[in-house]
Structures are given as C-alpha cells and as structure tokens.
Image (cartoon, helix red, strand yellow):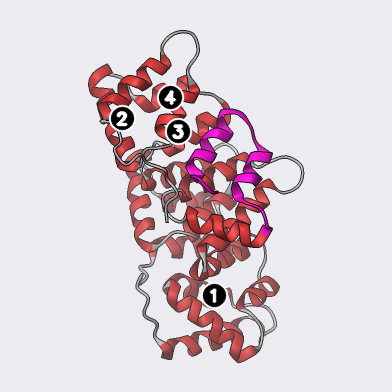
Amino acid sequence: MSTLNVPPMPPPPRDDAIKLKAAFKGFGCDTAAVINILSHRDAMQRSYIQQEYRIMYSDDLMKRLSSELSGDVKKAVSLWMHHPAGRDAVILRQSFTGNIDLDAVTEIICSRTPSMIQQFKQAYHAMFGGYLEHDIENHASGDHKKMLLAYVTKPRYEGPEVDQTFTEKDAKALYKAGEKKFGTDEKTFIQIFSERSRAQLAAINSAYHSMYGKSLKKAIKSETSGKFEYALLTILQCAENPAKYFTKVLHKAMKGMGTDERTLTRVVVTRTEIDMQYIKAEYQKKYKKTLADAIHSEISGHYRAFLLNLLGPNA
C-alpha cells in the first residue's frame, strides 16, 4: 500500500515543468518548491513531467536536478525520479561501484518478486549495457554468489497456492541439510530458497517449526553465516512479511550513533509506492514510536522534508 499523497486533481505535467524551471532560476535553487512538487507525484506523473520538461526546455530534468540539488536530498530525489525497475537497477549498479555494498545488492534482489526481478534485469541491461549476472559473478563470492545468481535466474511462481506434498518434503530436506548433519549442505538451501514461491516458503517455515520445534530462521542463523545467511533470511522474511523485514532494516539504519542515510533513502524511496503503509504500522507496533518521529529526530533540512512527504500523513 502506497503512502504517496498525490493531489486528487494534480496539475498538468506542463505546469509542473514550468514551476520546476522557475525554481531553478536565479542564484541558488528553490529546493522547497522542487520537493513539494515531486514528492506529491506518482511514477507515471513524474515520467510525464520529465517528458514535458525535455520538450519545453530541450533539457534533461534528471541532470538538471542533479546539478541544482546537493547532498542527501539530491540522492533521494534523483532515485525517486526513476521508474521502479530503473531505480532498482541504479541502486544495484551503484552498489557494485565505488564503495561496494553487497548488503544493498542482497536486499534489492532477495526482497523483490520474480516479476520485479525480470523488470530490473532488463532495465539494468538497457541502462548500463551489461548484465546483472556478470556483476554478481565479479563482486560476490561463495554460496552468497550462488544464491544471488540462482535467485535472479530461476523462475518462481507468484500466486498464493501452496503444494502441501512439497512442503513437508522440503522442510525435511532442509533439516537434513542443516541441523541434522555435521556441517551444512548449502546446495539444498540454495535450491529450495531459489525455486519455491513466497507462499510455499512461508508454508515450509511453519511445517519446519511444527516438525522440529524450532524456527527455520534459527536454523539458518546457526547453520550459515555472513552474506549467505543474510540472503537466506531476507528471502525467508520477505516470504512471510516484507513490511516487517523493512521495518528492521530502517530501525538498524537509525540505531546508535549517526544515521545510515544511504539505507534510509533506499528503503523509503523504493517502498513508498509499494507497502509503506504496512511498514509504518509495523514500525509503530514494534518500536512504539512512529516512523516519521524516528526519521524526524535523525535527519534535518530539505532531506528530512522530502522523506517525510513520501511517508505521507499520520506516519
């Protein structure tokens, strides 16, 4: 569920383009005006505004925003302007270059549905001329690499139906591959986690619990480690409740000294038009404060205004 607060009768994209051009005029940029417009437009409207801007001013709005804005608000607005698949592709590409961030790569890949993965793989190739699989191959390693490659290449069912005969068989196979044996048969984990649908994995999880009196999550934590463990846990938690998973990611980004702005921006911007309403509810339930309050006390200025606009009212 989206939290985006779009006006019931948004102005024509042409009007928005004119207002944005005016905000760029003169010395400095009227950042408040820019974020006020763009944080209240959905993906389709943002794309029309970009088209109008190019037609009217022979200028690329994305490049213009990049030169007019700065710091964290620039990064957030720039990401927001992409369509969802293009945005995931950009985050993945950035995470493979400069400061390599394999946690971000893992989060994007393992928290997305099969159809989203197909779309961002195509966008990745169209935008950067390379294949996502090649970058995974070059930057990840070991079982983590095998898991990511399997997850982006194997087709998975997206519906709610569950095949009960498979469920207990898979739970048994995972038990045998992990807790029952000395060492871990990672291959079995990779196969089941990359081939089963979300509904099926959630069913396997509850079957595992009732058969062995222990959660599959605990088994993963005791049997695997590092980035491979993080990939398996991300897949499992997103199969059960993506909002709960992202609530934890957000909390971790704001916990302790300093804020991980990169993660904060990534999660707020990518989930606003998907399930932010649920994330806000989960955050309130788990941490006894609103997500808006948490963000408000961590960051400031135009960056804060922009993220809070995306969260919508009653955050």
Q: Could you tell me residue 54's position as x and y percent?
A: 27, 23
Residue picked out by circle 3: 78
Mark 2 secondary-structure assignment: helix
Q: CA distance from mark 1 to mark 3?
A: 37 Å
Residue 225 located left or right of residue 191 = right
Instruction: Give the mark nearest the N terminus, 3 or 4.
Output: 4
Amino acid carrying mark 3 in the image: Ser
Q: Is residue 249 visible?
A: yes
Q: Is residue 113 magenta?
A: no
- Based on the displayed image, in which of its 4 quarters is residue 34 positioned? top left
Q: Image point 35% across, 68% down: which residue?
A: 155
Q: Position of residue 224 (x, y in %)?
A: 66, 70
- The residue lying at 61 percent from left, 62 percent from top is 230
Q: Residue furthest top?
A: 26
Q: Which residue is mark 4?
A: 65
Q: CA distance from mark 2 to mark 1?
A: 44 Å
Of badges 1 and 3, nearer the viewer stands: 3
Q: For mark 1, give the secondary structure.
A: helix
